[in-house]
Amino acid sequence: MITPTENIPATEDELIEKAHALAGQSLGEIAKQANIEVPANLNRDKGWPGLLLEYVLGATAGSKPEPDFPELGVELKTIPINALGKPLETTFVCVAPLVGLTGVNWQTSHVKHKLSKVLWVPIVAERSIPIPERIVATPFLWTPSPDEEQLLANDWQELTDMIVLGDVENISGKHGQVMQLRPKAANSKALTNAFDKHGKPFKTLPRGFYLKIPFTHMLINRHLRVG
């Protein structure tokens, strides 16, 4: 298990400088410098690249429901991309609460808290590339524009309304323009509480909010100027 380093960045500029220093390096090189073993595959360690970079950059939040760099209000998101800069998968934001949503709004939501300021670290990580040889592209800091935040807020409201109305089981990837809700669980036995349309509790898979690929692709295109 990778634990946070004591080398915590004191300022946003220091964090960005540390992140930019990783650009062009392979995960194997970064892991070797940190004296961390590279897993043979990511079948059971899907989040390993993110944990590695959290470690070397000095993130301290761990699994707490706050940004990875709480003192700076910055969330770290690694994102696997292909050689053309297109994300290879959706991006997990945070676990979605399925109960206790009375009085919750966008301004107080975990999603807004997590996405207020994000340090994106793209990694060229096509499956054909061995894990140690996957390359870190240029990191960039992103704060949602008013239009982007409105899109996120609209999706959050739509998905949250469906949860509150007991419609969670009918939510699919088609819902939401830039963000979707989908099951997030290590296995099908990891169930959590929810309510149906009649207000009766039942067990279902935990859900998570994920950013859709076209949205993150747009961000990468804008900041990295790739095709």
Image (cartoon, rainbow, N blue to C red):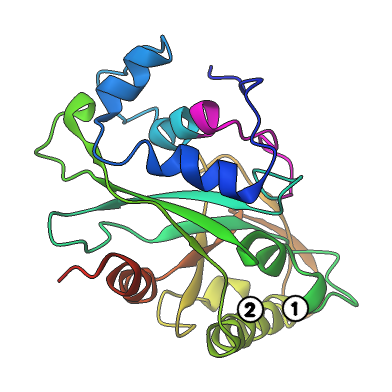
Q: Residue at x 55, y 90 (%)?
A: 147
Q: Residue reaching furthest right?
A: 103
Residue 125: image location, x then y, percent: 22, 43
Quarter of the image where one finds residue 223: bottom left
Residue closer to the observer: 105 or 54: 54
Q: Is residue 187 visible?
A: no
> Counting other residues with Cα less than 10 Å from the Cα at mark 1, is it few (<14), some (14-19), or many (20 or more)?
some
- Left or right: where does residue 46 sit relative to residue 118? left
Residue 152: image location, x then y, percent: 57, 80
Residue closer to the observer: 147 or 158: 147
Quarter of the image where one finds residue 88: bottom left
Residue 188: image location, x then y, percent: 50, 43
Magenta span covers which residues?
Answer: 54-66
Residue bearing the label numbered 2 = 156
Asked whether disc 1 touches disc 2, contact meaning CB atoms under 8 Å apart, the reply is yes
Residue 198: image location, x then y, percent: 78, 80
Q: Residue at x 60, y 41 (%)?
A: 190
